């Protein structure tokens, strides 16, 4: 029998997570230069459109179908096109309609792909990006989601990290953030540095958009984390509180680091700290106490604030700090379970600091490194192949001109039309024109 309360919560959570992708588009869009804002936002919206379709066709089946390879991948044909699931009321969680679970997991796949785009801002052609998104989701995300999220039952065999390794990743520290973070690093290496990287200022063009996007991400993330309880219950409540306090602590940690290092606490730092905290608490939100969540979040804020400068030291151009925030934050949040987990939390596991020894710690490390290695290597191969065959990156001349006008034939801000005639005439200009016309008639 369908649990209507749990179903309502999961569908609401799915809608919250769906909102995160437009929120990410605003967050990323504000961080790039004005000549790249539309392309940056289109990469998120393109992922939303494409992954929605292929998730229904084979993505869900590949992620949650019966295992066909020692815990490595689900059968992509078992539920192809969601065949046989529309009337099924017994999903992975037991009390939900199968389609509610399908909907909830779909939006995770969408935003994971969209996250990668921030690492290659200003220089990636839209067509190759869409091709990459479909291939990457099929070869990397769907199998990794099977590893991490697909739990075995009496009649179903799931993935190896969830069932054999038994690493804890409540809502996607490995499958989403480490996965997307290292993929962003691989693509940044394949595409190379932006023109003027390390020499010219490449400041965010609209911090208002950045902070609006961060706010939407924080809002939607409660569906991301608390919704992963797959029920409206105590676990969801604990996760909700842990998500709130870890995020606040991370933003404070980032701001304090900025103030000490640079002398200023910035709005970009506040927004970036919010995302760093959300990333770090994602895998651990069911296994730590609220005090543990505050500690985890504060450390994440400091670590990620320091990590974003690594691109200058090592020479890779991660445009919008996907590596510094998502890879580093995801690694810390996943591994921190082995230190800060307490059996009093819903996951019921003690970490090293609570007398549990290193048993959970080594499991967390192995799970994190496995996803990092697989995603990094395969992403590099996919990106390199597309670059050689089709050309992933735009030319330097087009990059200098602006990717929005070259690739999309549009600009984010039609400033030339202000004060001019025609459809672009400003309101004040229109009023003066109408006044002059009236005076002519009277004369």
Image (spheres, rainbow, N blue to C red):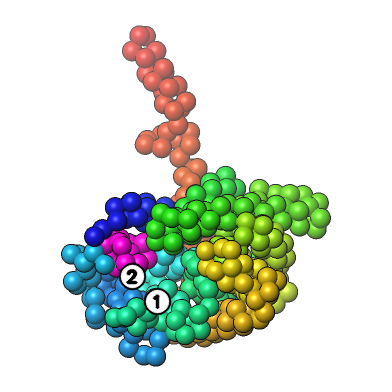
Asked if residue 380 shows in the view, the reply is no
Q: Is residue 275 left or right of residue 45?
A: right
Q: Nearer the viewer, residue 37 or 170?
A: 170
Q: Quadrant of the N terminus?
A: bottom left
Q: Which mark is residue 92?
A: 2
The residue depicted at 53 percent of the width and 73 percent of the height is: 168
**Are the residues at dot 1 and dot 2 in contact (C-beta closer than 8 Å)?**
yes
Asked if residue 266 shows in the view, the reply is yes
Q: Which mark is residue 333?
A: none
Q: Nearer the viewer, residue 135 or 170?
A: 170
Is 261 inside the magenta-drawn segment? no
> Callout 2 environment at 10 Å: few (<14), some (14 to 19), or many (20+)?
some
The residue depicted at 39 percent of the width and 76 percent of the height is: 150
Is 100 inside the magenta-drawn segment? yes
SS type, badge 1 = loop
Image: magenta residue range: 91-106
Q: Which residue is mark 1?
A: 151
User: Which x, y percent locates residue 371?
Assistant: 52, 80
Question: Gap between marks 1 and 2, in whole Å?
Answer: 8 Å
User: Which x, y percent locates residue 224?
Assistant: 46, 59
């Amino acid at each position: 029998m369908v649990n209507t309360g749990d179903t309502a919560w999961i569908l609401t959570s799915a809608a919250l997570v769906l909102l995160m992708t437009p929120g990410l588009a605003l967050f990323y869009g504000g961080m790039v230069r004005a000549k790249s804002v539309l392309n940056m936002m289109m990469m998120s919206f393109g992922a939303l459109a494409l992954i929605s379709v292929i998730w229904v066709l084979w993505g869900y089946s590949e992620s949650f179908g019966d295992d066909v390879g020692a815990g490595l991948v689900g059968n992509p044909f078992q539920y192809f096109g969601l065949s046989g699931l529309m009337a099924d009321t017994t999903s992975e969680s037991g009390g939900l309609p199968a389609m509610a679970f399908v909907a909830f997991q779909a939006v995770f796949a969408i935003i994971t792909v969209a996250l990668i785009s921030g690492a290659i801002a200003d220089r990636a052609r839209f067509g190759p990006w869409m091709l990459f998104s479909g291939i990457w989701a099929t070869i990397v995300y769907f199998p990794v989601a099977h590893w991490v999220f697909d739990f075995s039952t009496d009649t179903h065999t799931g993935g190896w990290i969830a069932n054999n390794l038994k690493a804890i990743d409540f809502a996607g520290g490995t499958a989403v953030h480490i996965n997307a973070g290292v993929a962003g690093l691989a693509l940044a290496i394949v595409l190379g540095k932006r023109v003027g990287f390390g020499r010219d200022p490449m400041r965010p063009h609209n911090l208002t958009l950045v902070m609006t996007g961060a706010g939407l991400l924080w809002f939607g993330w409660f569906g991301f984390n608390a919704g992963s309880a797959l029920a409206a219950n105590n676990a969801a409540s604990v996760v909700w509180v842990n998500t709130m306090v870890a995020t606040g602590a991370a933003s404070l940690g980032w701001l304090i680091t900025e103030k000490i290092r640079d002398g200023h606490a910035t709005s970009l730092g506040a927004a970036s700290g919010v995302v760093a905290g959300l990333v770090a608490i994602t895998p651990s939100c069911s296994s730590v106490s609220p005090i543990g969540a505050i500690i985890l979040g504060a450390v994440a804020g400091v670590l990620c604030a320091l990590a974003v400068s690594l691109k200058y030291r090592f020479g890779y151009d991660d445009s919008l700090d996907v590596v510094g925030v998502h890879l580093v934050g995801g690694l810390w949040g996943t591994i921190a379970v082995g230190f800060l987990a307490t059996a009093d939390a819903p996951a019921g596991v003690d970490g090293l600091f609570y007398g549990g020894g290193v048993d959970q710690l080594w499991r967390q490390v192995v799970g994190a490194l496995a996803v990092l290695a697989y995603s990094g290597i395969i992403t590099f191969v996919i990106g390199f192949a597309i670059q050689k065959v089709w050309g992933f990156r735009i030319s330097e001349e087009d990059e200098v001109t602006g990717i929005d006008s070259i690739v999309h034939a549009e600009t984010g801000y039609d400033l030339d039309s202000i004060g001019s005639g025609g459809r672009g005439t400003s309101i004040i200009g229109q009023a003066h024109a109408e006044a002059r016309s009236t005076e002519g008639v009277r004369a």
